[in-house]
């Protein structure tokens, strides 16, 4: 309860319109209208969320009713054929794999940069650096995609041949040439895209580490790295986890950067370096223009799956953050 | 394992602000030296220059000389990390590592210095906790988080953590200011025991405390807000509190200011 | 204190008496020297082994840097210092590894985009031009972006603002908690899902055509949670004393909010809204599903297909020939410029309007 609620005169609605002081009832009307408007907006947000779920589910039901394949296990996407046969297996695989690659590349580097800004960089450098990272977070995804497809892809095949030479025997890093428009490339581009957001959230957490915990380690004769290991990382661990999950949410749902970079196909390959595969969002972007009514519904159905996945990931991240807030609040 | 500290001509800055100016004193081994003085007189800053914690603050730097026995703390090639390991510190607010157990808190400093066998570690942890008069209260819950203890216990845990690495000197920055009277007495008793083995320097706001625990007392003062703090005098505690040689000391002690 | 336990201490201290405060250290210039050496070695190996990708050169140099630093420090300073140096050099490597692609992105966009970017490009549409032809411009896309983003902001800013007011000034109940949670979750909705929602609701169910307005609705959904979050932060910064002072004077709550709370926070709120605008101005996916992408100028966002800058880039990229690529890069440069401008303006406002007492 806010202080204001206790100050406000008691039962408002019981005051009749012909109350002795008209100014007072006007004041209450003003308060009521204002509260109604703001509460209404909050409710509107909830309604929109519910509506998104409802409408996507509705179209999904339509799509699934005519689907001749198994929605979860079919490896094909022939939603415009008659009868329509489509499944999300390939998309789910591609989405998860590319996002995992992105996380594996981005999270350690982002933690490194966050530490660099919070604990290593000279103070004169730290603020502008944070600022640059903020600006990079603002670069639109289509630009990352354009850069990835037209600049990065041609420069990657050399690296891919190299990986093939040394790691090709694993099968995962087998590369048979051609444009490097593969899930691994997508992972690299996604990693670069989520780097700023993971860095920013981690940096915030690292900067919040209470001075006294760091000094406790310092006074024991800890080196800078030991201070970080003893007091900064334990304090920031949950923050880094939630930052990574926010980044993961972003990577899972990214459309344009994947659609521009990937050369899609409906197969699941062991090799991450060879072109092929697809993601939920990329498939929607690529298939939308040619889709008929059923095709559109099928794409919406895959969108619903994506929606649910990102909901779970983001909800989880927020829950971790909320718990950490309580924890550190109780400690302060 | 107690060493003497010799300070000569020490001046410390925060950026361009001069916090303390031209301080010289000797701290005797196996004794308790108390720093007293009004707020902002630089006694905490001075304390932090004695184990090179001052330079951790952005903009903090130091001029002058501090000798530990005959070794200069600020000499070329001296590693501040080694200095801090040799000169332990206890802070104003108890600051056990929140994610570590009581045991791990005490063992933290030792683990930094390399591999210890479990049995060896057990011994040192028990010895340090006994040394901090905490063993009997926590021996059954060594694996519980240190943050679950009371304030006074936490502060004694921090003292145990500091003495576990067997420092030459123990610096205490107002160690009782966040504690209740009972815990304060426990800590004061502990200080009396610890001085058998360590050189102890304690900053305190509380003149009775200085009178109770210390052998020597240093009085710091500043001419005006924004001016650097200076050492007014240092002498046997008894003398400082009965017959100080400087008028300002007497004024402060008799409560005329500060 | 147990003396029996303490008896062991003299032995220990004798042990430790040997460790001095001083020990051998690498010279000051060592990290820089090792960095230069590694870069040289990396390039040499790259040249000799004829490695085509500069990424490989960099990778070799980075590994050499980390390895040499660790080995040298272990030998000279000891293992703890070596670990410390290792962490330091890894952190530096991370920083540089991240900077390289990001700098390359900005560099490539500017270099490849600047050639086509002129008055003609900004004031002409693609009307009557085939993808294979040179020329054309982004005017129609600029119009589309401005209108769609403007409309989205008109919907999202008031709703977001009021929601934030509800959460901060009236919140605390179950509803507020639910709204808070779902605002957070909504921040993470993939933009294409927002597009699919408007598609199934506005175009499939209500049977309206593709239009700028449809795109604006999807953008508004993406913008709302961002506005709520930033406004909430700003309102929380308004000191409670101000509210109490006003309420104590008998000013009703809604007037207190309008006359005291909002004016205090207005700088930060404006900044937040502008950052949100910058964010959605670069969104492609929902627009792609909803505005259909016209090649000619359509000044009416409520009727008929439009384009937008990000969508234009996507179309030109898909066209896949050099003229189209040039247009895509130039449009990307325009888009980045626009977004950066909004960001800088927003931060300028934040600094200019920052509550003086707040810091």
Image: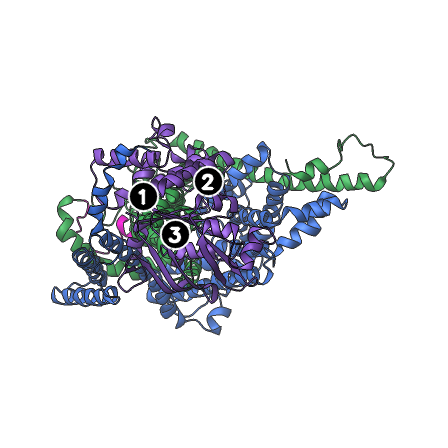
Mark 3–mark 1 distance (CA, rounded to whole Å): 47 Å
Residue at x-position 59% and y-position 41%: C167
**Who's green, chain-wise?**
A
Front-most of C213 and B151?
Answer: B151
Which residue is denoted by mark 2 in the rendering?
Answer: A328
Please tell me whether mark 3 sits on a helix, a strand or a loop.
helix
Q: Colour of chain C?
A: blue
Which colour is chain B painted? Answer: purple
Where B68 sits versus B138, above or below? Answer: below
Residue range of the region highlighted in magenta in the rendering: A172-186
Where does residue A27 sit, x and y in percent of width and height?
78, 42
Mark 1 in CB contact with mark 2 (< 8 angstroms): no
In the image, residue A302 lies at what x, y percent?
39, 38
A27 magenta-colored: no
The chief SS type of the magenta part is loop
Q: Nearer the viewer, mark 1 or mark 2?
A: 1
The foreground one among B256 and A59 is B256
Callout in the foreground (3, 1): 1
Say whether residue A37 is left or right of residue A62: right
Which label number is shown at residue C32?
none
The reply to whether discs 3 and 2 touch (Cβ–Cβ < 8 Å) is no
Residue occupied by mark 3: A199
Q: Chain of mark 3?
A: A
Position of residue B161 measured from the top left corner of the image (x, y, whole percent): 34, 41
User: Is circle 1 on the same chain as circle 2?
Assistant: no
- In the image, what residue occupies the spot 16% across and 44% down? A171
Residue placed most toward the observer, B244 or A155:
B244
Q: Which residue is mark 1?
A: B197
């Amino acid at each position: 309860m806010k202080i204001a609620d206790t100050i406000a005169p008691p039962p408002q609605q019981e005051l009749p319109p012909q109350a002795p002081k008209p100014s007072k009832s006007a004041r209450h009307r003003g308060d009521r209208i204002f509260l109604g408007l703001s509460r209404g907006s909050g409710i509107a947000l909830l309604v929109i969320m519910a509506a998104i779920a409802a409408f996507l589910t509705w179209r999904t039901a339509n799509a699934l009713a005519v689907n001749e394949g198994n929605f979860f296990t079919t490896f094909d996407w022939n939603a415009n054929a008659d009868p329509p046969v489509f499944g999300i297996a390939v998309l789910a695989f591609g989405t998860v794999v590319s996002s995992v690659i992105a996380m594996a590349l981005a999270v350690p580097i982002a933690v490194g940069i966050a530490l660099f800004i919070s604990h290593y960089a000279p103070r004169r450098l730290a603020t502008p650096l944070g600022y640059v990272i903020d600006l990079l977070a603002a670069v639109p995804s289509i630009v990352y995609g354009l850069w990835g497809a037209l600049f990065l892809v041609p420069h990657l095949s050399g690296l891919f041949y190299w990986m093939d030479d040394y790691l090709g025997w694993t099968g995962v890093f087998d590369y048979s040439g051609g444009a490097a428009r593969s899930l691994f490339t997508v992972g690299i581009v996604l990693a670069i895209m989520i780097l700023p957001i993971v860095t920013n959230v981690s940096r915030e957490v690292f900067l919040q580490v209470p001075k006294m915990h760091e000094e406790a380690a310092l006074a024991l004769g800890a080196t800078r790295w030991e201070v970080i290991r003893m007091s900064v990382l334990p304090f920031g661990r949950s923050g880094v986890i939630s930052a990574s999950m926010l980044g993961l949410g972003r990577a899972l749902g990214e459309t344009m950067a994947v659609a521009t970079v990937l050369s899609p196909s409906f197969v699941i390959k062991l090799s991450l370096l060879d072109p092929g595969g697809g993601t939920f969002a990329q498939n929607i972007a690529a298939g939308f223009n040619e889709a008929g009514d059923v095709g559109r519904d099928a794409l919406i159905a895959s969108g619903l799956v994506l929606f649910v996945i990102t909901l779970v990931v983001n909800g989880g991240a927020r829950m971790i953050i909320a718990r950490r807030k309580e924890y550190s609040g109780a400690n302060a | 394992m107690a060493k003497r500290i010799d300070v000569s001509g020490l001046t410390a800055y925060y950026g361009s602000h001069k916090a303390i100016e031209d301080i010289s004193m000797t701290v005797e081994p196996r004794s308790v030296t108390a720093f007293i003085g009004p707020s902002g007189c630089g006694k905490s800053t001075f304390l932090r220059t004695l184990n090179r914690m001052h330079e951790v603050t952005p903009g903090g730097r130091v001029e002058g000389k501090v000798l530990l026995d005959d070794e200069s703390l600020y000499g070329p090639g001296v590693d501040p990390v080694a200095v801090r390991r040799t000169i332990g510190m206890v802070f104003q607010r108890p600051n056990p590592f929140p994610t570590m157990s009581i045991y791990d808190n005490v063992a933290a400093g030792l683990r930094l210095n390399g591999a210890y066998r479990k049995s060896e570690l057990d011994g040192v942890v028990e010895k340090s906790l006994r040394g901090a008069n905490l063993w009997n209260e926590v021996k059954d819950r060594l694996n519980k988080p240190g943050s679950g203890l009371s304030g006074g216990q936490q502060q004694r845990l921090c003292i145990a953590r500091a003495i576990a690495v067997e420092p030459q000197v123990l610096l205490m920055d107002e160690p009782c200011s966040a504690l209740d009277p009972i815990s304060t007495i426990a800590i004061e008793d502990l200080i009396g025991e610890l001085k058998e083995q360590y050189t102890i320097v304690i900053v305190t706001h509380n003149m009775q405390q200085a009178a109770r625990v210390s052998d020597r007392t240093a009085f710091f003062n500043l001419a005006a807000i924004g001016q650097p703090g200076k050492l007014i005098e240092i002498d046997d505690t008894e003398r400082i509190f009965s017959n100080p040689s400087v008028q300002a000391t007497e004024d402060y002690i008799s409560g005329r200011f500060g | 204190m147990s003396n029996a336990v303490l008896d062991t201490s003299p032995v220990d201290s004798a042990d430790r008496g040997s460790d001095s405060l001083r020990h051998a250290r690498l010279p000051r210039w060592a990290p820089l020297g090792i960095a230069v050496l590694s870069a040289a070695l990396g390039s040499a190996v790259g040249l000799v082994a004829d490695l085509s990708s500069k990424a490989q050169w960099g990778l070799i140099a980075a590994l050499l840097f980390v390895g040499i630093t660790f080995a040298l420090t272990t030998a000279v300073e000891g293992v703890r210092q070596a670990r410390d140096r290792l962490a330091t050099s890894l952190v530096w490597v991370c920083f540089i590894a991240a900077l390289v692609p990001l700098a390359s992105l900005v560099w490539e966009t500017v270099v490849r985009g600047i050639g086509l970017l002129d008055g003609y490009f900004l004031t002409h549409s693609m009307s009557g031009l085939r993808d294979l032809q040179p020329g054309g411009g982004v005017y129609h896309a600029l119009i589309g972006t401005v209108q769609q983003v403007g409309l989205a902001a008109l919907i999202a800013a008031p709703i977001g603002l009021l929601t934030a007011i509800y959460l901060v000034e009236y919140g605390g109940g179950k509803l507020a908690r639910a709204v808070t949670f779902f605002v957070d979750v909504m921040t993470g909705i993939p933009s294409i899902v927002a597009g699919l929602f408007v598609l199934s609701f506005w175009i499939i169910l209500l049977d309206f055509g593709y239009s700028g307005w449809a795109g604006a609705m999807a953008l508004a959904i993406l913008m709302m949670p961002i506005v709520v979050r930033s406004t909430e932060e700003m309102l929380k910064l308004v000191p409670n004393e101000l509210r109490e002072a006003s309420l104590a004077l008998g000013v009703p709550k809604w007037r207190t909010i309008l006359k005291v709370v909002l004016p205090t926070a207005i700088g930060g709120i404006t900044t937040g809204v502008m950052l949100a605008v910058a964010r959605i101005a670069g969104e492609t996916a929902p627009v792609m599903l909803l505005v259909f992408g016209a090649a000619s100028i359509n000044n009416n966002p409520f009727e008929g297909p439009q384009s937008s800058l990000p969508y234009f880039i996507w179309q030109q990229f898909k066209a896949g020939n050099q003229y189209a690529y040039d247009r895509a890069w130039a449009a990307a440069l325009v888009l980045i410029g626009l977004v950066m401008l909004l960001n800088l303006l927003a931060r300028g406002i934040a600094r200019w309007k920052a509550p003086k007492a707040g810091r």
